[in-house]
Image (tube, rainbow, N blue to C red):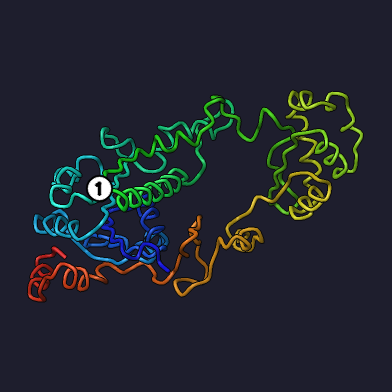
Amino acid sequence: MSILNNIRILDFTWALAGPYATRLLADFGAEVIKVQSPVMAMENNAFARGYYKTWNRNKLGITLNLNRLEGVALARRLAQICDVVVENFSPRVLANWRMDYDNLKKSKSEIILVSLSVMGKQSSYNGFGATVQALSGMTHFTSFPGGPPLGPGFSYADHVAGLYASIKLMEALEQRRKTGKGQHIDLSEVDIMIQMLPFDEFTPLGNNSPLSAPQNIYLCRDGRWCVLSITNEAQWRGLKKALGNPIWAENVKFSTLSGRLNNREELNIMVTGWTQQYTATEVMSRLQRSGVPGGIIKDARDLTKNPQLKARGFFIKSSIAPLVDAVPFRMSAARAEYKKPAPSPGADNEYVYGKLLGLTKPEMSKLKANQVI
C-alpha cells in the first residue's frame, strides 16, 4: 500500500535538501512532479547527472522555462492541481511570480507550501549546505583546537534539512486531513542545524572529548584508520589487555580518567605505536575482543557490506540501480517502494500538460517551439 498515493506535489527544488525531502515522499507513493529548465546544463556533467539521479527517483519530470511569462502562468496553473508546492528558491522568487502563499491560497485554501531557505523567508541570505553549516556554528564546532574552521566535509546540513522538511510536510498533511486547512511551512535551515549542535560546549574539540581518553583516530599498518574511545575504567583495563599490558600503561598518571585526559597527547602517541603494528581489521578485532569500543573508519565500499546496515535494510537492490539507499525511516501502515529512476528532462510533459492540465497537442507544440516547455 502506498500511503501517499493520493497526494500530488509540485517540486521546484534543486541541489540536495529540497529534492531529498520530496524524494522521501515519492518513495511512499506521492506523485511528485519535478520541474526542470528546458536547457539542462547537467547533460554534459557526469557528477551533476549522478547527483540528480540520486535525489530524484520515483518522480515525474517536466520541463518549464520560468524566465518566460508563459512559463510562470503554467506554473501557477500546475500549483492549483497539486496538494503541495515545495521550493527552495531565494525569498523573493515566489512573490515575483505571485506564487507566494498569500496568492496560492486565494484560489486553493487547502494548499500546503513548503519553503526551504538558508534563514527563512524573512531573510535575504542565499547559500548552500556549507553556508548553513558556517552560519549555524557547525563549521566551527567540527574544527580542531586552534585550527581553521573545517566543517564535516559534506553537506550534512542539507540531509538534516531534507529529513526535517519531509516530516513537517507529513505533519501538515495530517493536520489538513483533520481540519481541511492548508499552511505555509517556512523552514530556516540554519535554525534546523542549530538544534543539532552542542551549545553547552563552545570550544572546538577536534577528535577529543572531555569525557574520554584516549579517544582519537589512529593510523594502522595497512594505511587505514581505526577509532577508539575509552570512557571508564573497565574499558581502560580492556585497552591495556588488547595492547598486551605494556609497562608504560601502568604509570600512575594514566591510572584515572582525569590523569588520562591531562596526558591525552602522550597516550595517543603510545596507542598509535601499537595500531601501526597491525591492519585496521586486526586492530578492531583485538579491541572488541577486549571490550573496547573500537572500529574501522569505513569508506563507501565498506558501508555497502556492513552487516548492521544490511540488517536494517539501509541499502536495497532494485530495478533503479544495483544498490541504492532506502528511506531512513519506516511507517507502520505502509512501505516504501523504489519503482522509477529519476526522470529525464521533460519525460512526463505529455502526461502532466496534456492529461492533468488539459492542454491540446497543438498548444503543447507551440509551447515547445517557443522554448517554454
**Which of 291/106 is in front?**
106
Measuring 38% from the left and 39% from the top, which residue is drawn there?
189
Measuring 67% from the left and 27% from the top, which residue is drawn there?
210
* Residue type at numbered disc 1: Lys
Residue 150: % across, % down: 51, 36
Residue 343: % across, % down: 33, 68
* Residue 101 found in image quarter: top left
Residue 94: % across, % down: 19, 46
* Residue 95 found in image quarter: top left
Q: Is residue 2 above or below residue 67?
A: below
Residue 159: % across, % down: 45, 48
Q: Is residue 36 above or below residue 151?
A: below
What is the total number of numbered labels drawn onto the structure image?
1
Q: Secondary structure at mark 1?
A: loop
Measuring 74% from the left and 29% from the top, which residue is drawn there?
264
Image quarter where the C terminus lies is: bottom left
Q: Is residue 300 above or below residue 269?
A: below
Q: Residues within 10 Å of mark 1 (few under 14, many from 20)?
A: some
Image quarter where the N terminus lies is: bottom left
Measuring 74% from the left and 49% from the top, which residue is drawn there?
220
Tag 1 residue: 181
Relative to 36, 200 lies left or right:
right
* Residue at the outermost front position: 178
* Residue 257 found in image quarter: top right
